[in-house]
Image (cartoon, rainbow, N blue to C red):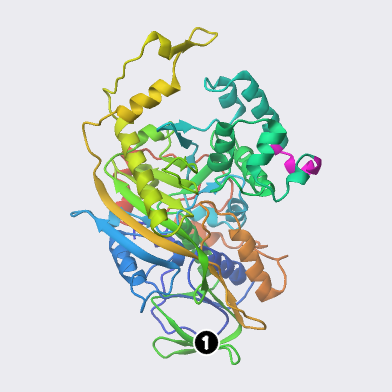
Amino acid sequence: MASASSSKVPAASPNTPPDSCDVLVYGTGLVESIVAAALAWQGTNVLHLDPNPFYGGLWASLNLEELKAWTDKINSPATNDTPFSNAYLYISRNLDPRKYAIDISPHVLFTRADLLNLLIQSRVSRYLEFKPLGSFHTFEQDSFEKVPGTKEDIFTSQNLTLLTKRSLMRFMKFVVIWDETPDVWLEYKGKPISLFLKEKFNLDEPQIVELVHSIALLSSPSSPTELALDRIKRYLSSMQVYGNFPAMYSMYGSGGEIAQGFCRSAAVAGAVYRLGTKLSSFDDESGVAVLDNGEKIKVTEKLITSYGLLPSSREITRMVAVVEKDCKEWFAEGESAAIVVFPPETLDGNKYAVQALVLGSGSGQVPLGQAVWYLSTQESGEQGRKDLFLALEKMEESILRESTEDFEFDVSEEDIAYLPNGMPVVSSVRLGESLRNFTPKESLKYLLKLTYTQKVTVPPPQPGSKTIYVPAPSIDIVYDGVVTRAQAIYEGVTGTTEDFFEVDFEDEDDDATATGNPPDTSIGDVADIDDEELGDHPDFDEEVAGEMTI
């Protein structure tokens, strides 16, 4: 697969796996891989298997050939053992499969996330490259408005009244210490965040929408106040940690790439890996695991698996589109990514927000001159698909309009207002009408379209069992909860989390020397690779990896 760290992942052993192990980990998803590495570094005898021919499990990033096979698998009830289903795939002809890396569970990483701290602590950061994500947009009045995420943005905004600016500033001062001032919000605990923002801070609907859906990245305005406050604080506290952006994404894929980094770390610590190997059965009483080729393995402690989970009634509808457009109009200078949010009631009555992650060729997921759009909604069934296609249509209209050099519209003197400094501002109503009436001279070419459903899963009852189940990727676009779940599983095996990745790496520099990576874990600048340079990136010919520099 077109993956930066694939060549850095341990080669799956062609030899017979050991007759016994302390812990058998089945599935190479992100949570399982973190746990495998943590256990291996504490001396646990870990055997790590995956039924797929690639790493990443439910978090994988797939090239086009792998994507076709994955689609066939999840559409067949006889072979589908994942929470994914109902896939519809279109791929244009004459595409080089290895030049694409499509995430099946796309995620972004905030700079204050506990996962980032773990990447540094575990030294897995050396196997990865991250790039900044600073452009967050809200769809309103048929256009994408950039979210004012800093004090400077608020002060310089031409769309906010002085009273609104003051209310926003007062809220921003509060939210960074919200958990230390319960007297302000406690009476709203469990109540909708929109009610709290309106009654306590006199914020207007447009500002509430941006805070809840584009900054907190929540799907519903009725989300509980305490959850939303924590999410908004995460965004604001992540700004300026490494630069003028709150979030990042990993090159060549998201969770699957990070999972591969932890797999490599586990292999360095002694874990044994084998891909394309299915677990046929596991006897909980005897601890004997039987593989698809008939081999038997004695598991003395635990089986950790992401398979065998039960579907719940909740689901998420996903869409992936690769377009023949670089989409640079949506990106901040020097960046190659953006998030676009369609709030509720902006797409013909959509109940939940539609989130869209846009990645350009600088992400390493598509070739030069192209972009990949990841859309998702918590709406299910046909309504979910309808919402996504409406959002796709709005994105197509927007990128064609914004990339058209000769876009013009007529205004009268009544359509223009003047700021105190004399700067003219066009009426947003008039502008919105012009945007709706715009007719592009070209059409957008889609090179790939994929829609599918992901069920939210729950573990089966397991009192006193040797089996520990790993939840499927969350329906959120962020990595919240990943480290907490990994620590809980680790505690289920060892009885404690006190030594979770408490490792002295001083004697492990041989691996860094072999890969050309320095043995330190310091954090520098975000990896800076121009799209033009990436077009000839060696990953398109052979798989490489670089040290993560943030």
Q: In the rendered image, which quarter is residue 7 located in?
A: bottom left
Q: Give the range drawn in magenta.
A: 175-183
Image quarter hosting the N terminus: bottom left
Which residue ends up furthest to the right in the rendered image? 183
Query: What residue do we see at 48% from left, 31% from top?
Result: 146
Q: Position of residue 413 (x, y in %)?
A: 40, 8
- Please state which of residues 531 and 65 is positioned toward the viewer in this rendering: 65
Q: Where is residue 46 in the image (x, y as percent from the top left)?
A: 55, 76
Q: In this image, 419 relative to 427: left or right?
A: right
Identify the residue position indicated by label 1 in the image. 282
- Please state which of residues 260 and 188 is positioned toward the viewer in this rendering: 188
Q: In the rendered image, which quarter is residue 36 located in?
A: bottom right
Residue 178 in view of the camera: yes
Residue 541 in view of the camera: no
> Which element is circle 1 on?
strand
Q: In this image, 269 relative to 500: left or right?
A: left
> Residue 526 magenta-drawn?
no
In this rendering, is residue 303 above or below 75?
below
Q: In the rendered image, which quarter is residue 318 located in?
A: bottom left
Question: How would you classify the magenta stretch by its main secondary structure?
Answer: helix
Q: What residue type is labelled 1?
A: Phe
